[in-house]
């Protein structure tokens, strides 16, 4: 029988070579077995590592939004899905902002699933503050959208639906 260290290495190897769907299937299978409680505890532990410090989250959002004008135009002209010639730069900037803050929306959803509503609200408040404070060219090109999104985030949070504020 292999020892614990061998099994740990094998688990790490398997996980690093699995796609998202296969990993989810494996977790579902483990959740049905006799070790379901340990599986849930391990998942909650992994999810609970989400950073919920207001200042840290705000700094991280400001960092991902920080794109100078040259990089913004390079992104517009890079041939990606944003480069549709029939869309104006403001619309494209809006789509980019939504894409860049998507990981924070995912964190909020995970926190809600763990019944950590106050932590989810902290993340929402930090994202809203960063959207208002960012001086990024991308944010400036989006004109009123960052402020409106921040308002929507906070309104949905007050209504008890913090993840809904990210949906636009």
Image (cartoon, rainbow, N blue to C red):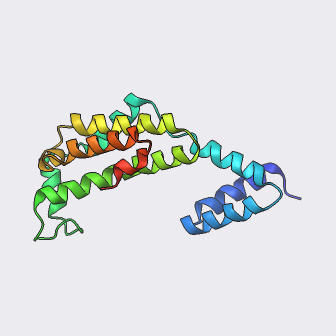
> Left or right: where does residue 37 sit relative to residue 12?
right
Q: How many marks?
A: 0
In this orientation, which residue lies closer to the viewer: 87 or 15?
87
In percent of width and height, residue 93 lies at: 18, 54
Give the residue at the far right of this rendering.
Answer: 1
In percent of width and height, residue 122 lies at: 43, 34
Q: Which picture quadrant has residue 159?
A: top left
In this orientation, which residue lies closer to the viewer: 22 or 106?
106
> Left or right: where does residue 82 sit relative to residue 155?
left
In percent of width and height, residue 14 lies at: 66, 62
Q: From the viewer's perspective, is residue 87 above or below residue 125?
A: below
Q: From the viewer's perspective, is residue 77 above or below residue 58?
A: below
In this orientation, which residue lies closer to the viewer: 76 or 127?
127
Identify the residue at image location x=37%, y=44%.
156
In percent of width and height, residue 71 lies at: 17, 52
Identify the residue at image location x=13%, y=55%.
90
Identify the residue at image location x=43%, y=46%.
161
Q: Which picture quadrant has residue 137?
A: top left
Identify the residue at image location x=66%, y=55%.
12
The quarter of the image holding the C terminus is: bottom left
The quarter of the image holding the N terminus is: bottom right
């Amino acid at each position: 029988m292999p020892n614990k260290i061998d099994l740990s290495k094998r688990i790490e190897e398997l996980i690093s070579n699995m796609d998202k769907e296969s990993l989810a299937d494996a977790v579902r299978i483990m959740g049905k077995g006799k070790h379901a409680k340990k599986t849930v505890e391990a998942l909650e532990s992994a999810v609970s590592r989400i950073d919920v410090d207001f200042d840290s989250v705000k700094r991280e959002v400001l960092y991902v939004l920080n794109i100078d004008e040259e990089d913004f135009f390079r992104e517009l002209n890079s041939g990606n899905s944003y480069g549709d010639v029939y869309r104006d730069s403001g619309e494209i900037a809006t789509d980019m902002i939504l894409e860049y803050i998507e990981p924070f929306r995912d964190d909020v959803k995970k926190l809600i699933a763990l019944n950590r509503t106050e932590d989810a609200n902290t993340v929402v408040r930090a994202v809203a503050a960063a959207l208002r404070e960012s001086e990024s060219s991308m944010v400036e090109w989006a004109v009123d959208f960052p402020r409106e999104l921040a308002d929507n985030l906070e309104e949905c949070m007050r209504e008890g639906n913090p993840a809904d504020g990210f949906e636009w």
